[in-house]
Image (cartoon, rainbow, N blue to C red):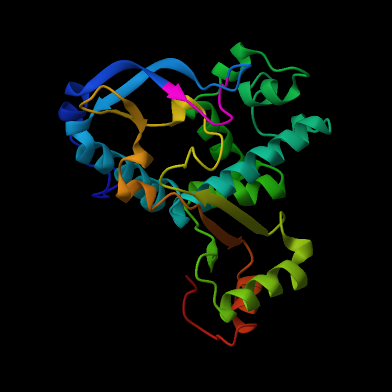
Amino acid sequence: MTGSGAGAIDFDWLVDNLRVVRAKIGIGEGETDEGEPTTIQTFAFEEKALQAVEAFILARYHLYSQVYFHRVTRGIEMTLSAFLRSIAVLVANGRAQELPVHERNPLVAYFAAVEPTLALYLALDDAVVWNMIEACADNGPEDVRVLGRDIRDRKLRKAIEIDMVNTTDLDRLRKGFIDNDLKSSIGQTIFRDAVSLSIYKDAQREDIPAHKRVFVKRADGNVVDIAALSKAVAALTEDQNVLRYYFADWRQYDSALKCAGETNGEAR
């Protein structure tokens, strides 16, 4: 539905080769008092499906990098988060009556509760959120009105991305200028988005919950973590950090570009 070609997997072949097994979980992860690794009941794929499993893991990575962590997606999520925080602050400060919605609006009720219940949470569906956005975009207090209009009208914020893997002098200059010269605006008109992206975690280097690991059942019956069997997966366990700054004020965006000697054109 996103238009991305990423995410295609051989679902039928994966399900056909899925088994329930007992797998050893080891180093620092469920050891017994004697230091011996314990076993758990979990899922594993037959070894003949190894390539399909590799494709499944890579597809998941590509969906995160191309869809879930896409800068437009994250930018809208940051704006929506700021909008909801603004609503929560108004309610917490006793200003709920300034919101152009009914006093029993589910969002108002949720933020007003000292300890929100499950029922209050389940009442927050898409219709409730969009109703608040539409209402505030036209008649809400100024701070939430601006955010509501940005979401409703799909007014995307300008973004500057810092390459945290192969960092250049330009990246360092931009990051330093934003973090130092524009520090007071971060969280207000500048949103900082830092996420970590990895294909697969290496259980030999850090404790990984068993349900987040992929096991493969070998022809001899042994069950192993896929990173121990697949060179493709083992070579891609390093985290890739993504750092972006989103600007509500185009003048601050422009100044961040000019600090790096740029006067026009789009940042990454």
Q: Is residue 147 above or below residue 9?
A: below
Q: Position of residue 94 (x, y in %)?
A: 83, 30
Residue at 67% x, 45% y is: 144
Look at the image and tell me in which quarter the N terminus lies.
Answer: top left
Which of the 4 image quarters holds residue 214?
top left
User: Which sits in the foreground, 22 or 122?
Assistant: 22
- In-image side of 106 versus 179 (left or right): left
Residue at 51% x, 34% y is: 130
Which of the 4 image quarters holds residue 56?
top left
Residue at 65% x, 82% y is: 259
Q: Magenta segment, principal secondary structure?
A: loop
* Residue interval drawn in magenta: 24-31
Which of the 4 image quarters holds residue 245?
bottom right
- In-image side of 108 versus 36 (left or right): right
Residue at 48% x, 29% y is: 126
- In-image side of 260 versus 21 (left or right): right
